[in-house]
Image: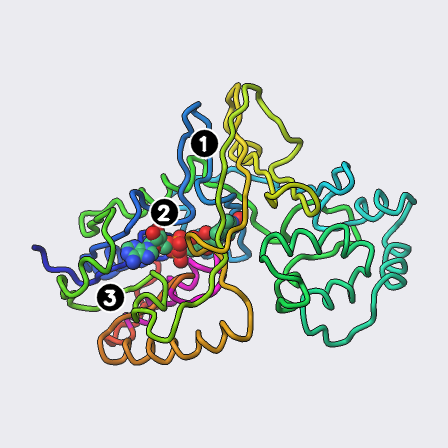
């Protein structure tokens, strides 16, 4: 058995970034374990039986406003430009989503410009300076009709809860635009790795100091390895502590993949179904991977109460439980050099860019504990 400097639990983006930085900047040897059969965590992509590249765990649209992060990742991949276009199906019609000027014109069947659209929304909105939940938040921005058409059904399906029971931030993330920008998100850089995410992370951890053990649950190797520097734990926070205070709540998804013998089925990468079907959205990822192929694959997402943990449930009860586990995590770090990193251990929804930025910060923190200033090493 080899000596390792770091034991990293989870071969997702966070585990891979920390292993790469540790090898490249510090010459530290890492062992990464993951209970799945593959690396790249939820960003994993693979070729479907018909040869179409698909995203295994829901569509992953890379976007960032951080040029440093993009520069760092560009060591491991080239990029293709991407426009993530999403439409929402309401009463049999496809509307641009997030709501923009075109959505408003189609929905209210009248010509609008920025000024008249703003006036219309002010007229529709239910004034509320301090919305306490997602329902109040959306009503305060777009009013009852748009709330019922685009948000209510989708949110209920996604979370299995009424929007009035969810924090305002859940729907607060979705912009409302008074221009014709149809992109899903506003970030300055919206790009996809030219050969996919799995290849990106394979390249990232292709280093003689990085060892990977797949299909290995942390529970089965706990206590066997004694890393010299510490353990980076990217698994679920409550599971590390044997769920001693109870389980942290997560919302899960089931993915159904259907293949079609035609080049494209949908007009854009994602269609949301707020009011029809049991699934929330259908995704034809080929629109953004730029793969040329005579066939296509669509994935359909069914929200579930049980299954893999995907979205932390944003309620006051979860926040309280999370705080209790956090205190244990702080002690574990101080006493045993266990660093809790990534979306599962932080119990926070993080986009890829945020997850990898947090991984770089975690790495700095680990080094700082050993009196090493990473800033001084950067650029190497
Ligand atoms: C449906 C969906 C869609 C998304 N879309 C986007 C998007 O469009 N754009 C975007 O930027 N982000 C998106 N994300 C977020 C993105 O997936 C995360 O930011 C990213 O995966 C976080 O990386 P991570 O390493 O923290 O966690 P993960 O990728 O989840 O990796 C954690 C790894 O730890 C392993 N693990 C857990 N427990 C154990 C254990 N006990 N033992 C061993 N291994 C263990 C898991 O198997 C997993 O491989 C999406 C997420 C979901 C769920």
In the image, 156 versus 296, the foreground residue is 156
Q: CA distance from mark 1 to mark 2?
A: 15 Å
Q: CA distance from mark 3 to mark 1?
A: 34 Å
In the image, 68 versus 257, the foreground residue is 257
Q: Is residue 314 left or right of residue 123?
A: left
Magenta region, residue range = 345-367
Examine the structure image and report whether residue 355 is included in the region drawn in magenta.
Answer: yes
The residue that mark 3 highlights is: 231
Which residue appears at 55% of the width and 67% of the height?
Answer: 314
The residue that mark 1 highlights is: 53
SS at circle 3: strand
Vertical arrangement, residue 205 with respect to residue 364, above or below: above
**Callout 3 crowding tier (Cα within 10 Å): few <14, some 14–19, many ≥20:** many
Please indicate, yes or no, whether residue 221 appears anywhere in the rendered image.
yes
Residue 279 position by quadrant: top right
* Residue 152 picture location, percent across and down: 71, 56
């Amino acid at each position: 058995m080899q000596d390792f400097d770091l034991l990293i639990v989870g071969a997702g983006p966070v585990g891979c970034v920390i292993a790469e930085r540790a090898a490249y900047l510090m010459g530290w040897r890492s062992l990464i374990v993951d209970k799945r059969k593959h690396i790249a965590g939820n960003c994993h992509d693979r070729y479907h039986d018909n040869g179409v590249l698909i995203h295994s765990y829901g569509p992953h649209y890379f976007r960032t406003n951080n040029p440093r992060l993009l520069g760092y990742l560009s060591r491991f991949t080239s990029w293709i430009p991407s426009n993530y276009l999403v439409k929402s199906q309401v009463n049999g019609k496809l509307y641009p989503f997030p709501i923009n000027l075109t959505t408003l014109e189609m929905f209210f069947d009248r010509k609008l410009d920025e000024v008249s659209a703003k006036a219309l929304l002010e007229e529709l909105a239910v004034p509320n300076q301090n919305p306490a939940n997602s329902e109040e938040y959306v009503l305060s921005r777009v009013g009852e009709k748009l709330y019922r058409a685009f948000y209510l059904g989708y949110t209920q399906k996604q979370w299995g809860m009424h929007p009035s029971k969810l924090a305002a931030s859940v729907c607060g993330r979705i912009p409302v635009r008074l221009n014709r920008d149809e992109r899903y998100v506003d970030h300055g850089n919206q790009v996809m790795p030219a050969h996919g995410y799995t290849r990106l992370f394979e390249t990232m951890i292709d280093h003689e100091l990085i060892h990977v053990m797949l299909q290995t649950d942390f529970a089965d190797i706990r206590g066997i390895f004694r890393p010299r520097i510490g353990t980076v734990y990217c698994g679920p926070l409550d599971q590390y502590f044997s769920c001693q205070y109870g389980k942290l709540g997560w919302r899960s998804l089931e993915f159904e993949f259907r293949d079609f013998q035609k080049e494209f089925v949908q007009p854009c990468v994602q269609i949301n179904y707020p009011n029809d079907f049991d699934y929330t959205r259908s995704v034809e990822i080929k629109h953004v991977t730029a793969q040329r192929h005579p066939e296509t694959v669509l994935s359909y997402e069914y929200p579930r109460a049980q299954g893999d943990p995907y979205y932390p449930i944003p309620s006051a009860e979860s926040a309280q439980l999370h705080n209790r586990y956090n205190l244990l995590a702080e002690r574990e770090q101080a006493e045993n050099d266990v660093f809790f990193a990534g979306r599962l251990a932080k119990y926070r929804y993080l986009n890829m860019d945020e997850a990898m930025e947090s991984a770089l910060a975690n790495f700095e923190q680990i080094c700082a504990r050993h009196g090493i200033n990473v800033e001084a090493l950067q650029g190497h």
